Image: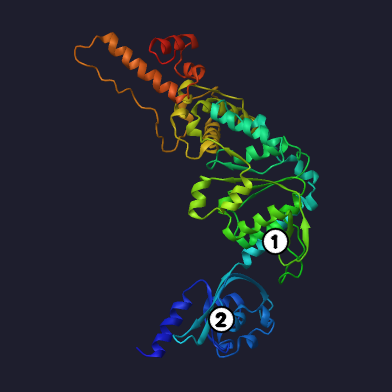
Amino acid sequence: MNNKQYRKILETLLNILEEGVHIVDSDGISILYNNAMAEMEQVDAANVIGLNILDCFPEIAEEDSTIWQVLQSRQPIYNKVQNYTGPTGKQINTINATVPVEDEQGNLMAAIEVAHDITRLTNLNDKLMQLQEMVTPAGKIKPKAKGIKKYRFEDLVGKDPEFIKCVNRARKAAGYDVPVLIYGETGTGKELFSQSIHYSGIRKDKPFLAQNCAALPENLLEGILFGTAKGGFTGAVDRSGLFEQANGGTLFLDELNSMPIDLQGKLLRVLQESYVRHIGGSKDIPVDVRIIASVNEDPQELIERGTLRSDLYYRLNVVNINIPPLRDRRSDIPYLAESLIRKHSSKMDKKPLTISRPAIRALMEYDYPGNVRELENIIIQALFMVDDENILSPDLLNLPCPRKVNRKPSSDYQAGEPLTEYMERVEKEILLNALDLCHGNVTHCASVLHLKRQTLQYKLIKYGILT
């Protein structure tokens, strides 16, 4: 196979890629320029191939061209954000990887640049930041934002001992101006805890802002957090970030483990120095912000996998709160269900329903991978199905892929065994299962079993379950 055939294969390969590819020789002469790059920059490849890169794009200065920088330094440049105006006047925003190519003797042969177009994402970033400013310009909440729901500890429903410990720990944390790290699975109520801490603390009259770190790519998230400076890059304007907007208040960083490692390092610097610098700016801006962060996986496992910086973890882990999943606090399900029925019945302009015992049992037997949020969705779906009923029955519950966690009594009848002894063995196992399901809550266990509390307590003592 000759060089012409190899080149044809390479051109075909490059032209099916979604990323733009631009290859120049050691003198900066363009030798390959794929269709994706041509479409991105709205340039005909015929006007690029064979020309020096600086002649093709005269609007880009030498010091701003990553290809030219790599040709001069012979050092690769990764994840570089490029913002420039193309020959047709189109504003282009890309993330580039540019690398030198050397032969076996170490002589420079070429430079390859691969560009990922993020123009649309950048435009989205601008819109998001404008919306943020509409809500919190200069850190002050407009009157329109007063309708936003503010959660407090009274909104945290549950009587499970472990859950109560979390609430009490959070209450204590509210009284001290220190960082808090919350660990909990998706749907356990991490933002409810964070808002409760803020609105019960000394910063309660200052802004509370929340940002999901998994919602945006690194360069957009960095701009939203730290702000941008006019002239920092093409099209950039002076715009405050969340740290400035939350100044004096609290910034909740949800799913911190989704934040890229490099950006975690920049966040750590801000926490250590208490100032931010706009992207493209040179001015240090003092900020006074309390950070509450959350992760949805075990922090130690995240550190071991390299998705959470250990130094950032130790900086934030002054107070840690581990919210138990709903499957570990099943005794709270009836209280949560009743609270959610009241909440959403009012929103739907329906009279509150009484939830039946069989419906409670059905709810308690489900595993809830989506935790409280999933329970809420189940209740909402049930309420939509209600017409003239006064009682929410199991038939109205649409439990997805139900998995019963309680086990059936396994006590088999032994030949010759007195019936009374067999019945006592079965009853004891049923009581043990029910008590385990209710996390040792005797009052609720009695309700589930349709027994008086005194009757249940007598039986538990009789079988040695309670002393």
For the residues bearing labels 1 and 2, Cβ distance under 8 angstroms: no
Q: Determine whether, in the image, residue 384 is placed left or right of residue 242.
A: left
| Quadrant, the N terminus | bottom left
Q: Which mark is residue 74?
A: 2
Pick the front one: 80 or 336: 80
Kindly indicate the quadrant of the structure image that contains residue 260: bottom right
Badge nearest the viewer, 1 or 2? 2
> Disc 1 residue type?
Asp
Q: Residue at x 77, y 44 (%)?
A: 144
Q: x, y (%) of residue 105?
A: 46, 87
Q: Is residue 210 visible?
A: yes
Q: x, y (%) of residue 310?
A: 56, 52
Vertical position of residue 169 compared to residue 300: above or below? above
How far is disc 1 from disc 2 in space, using C-alphas? 34 Å
Vertical position of residue 247 compared to residue 441: above or below? below
Residue carrying label 1: 126
Secondary structure type for disc 2: loop
Q: x, y (%) of residue 378?
A: 51, 35
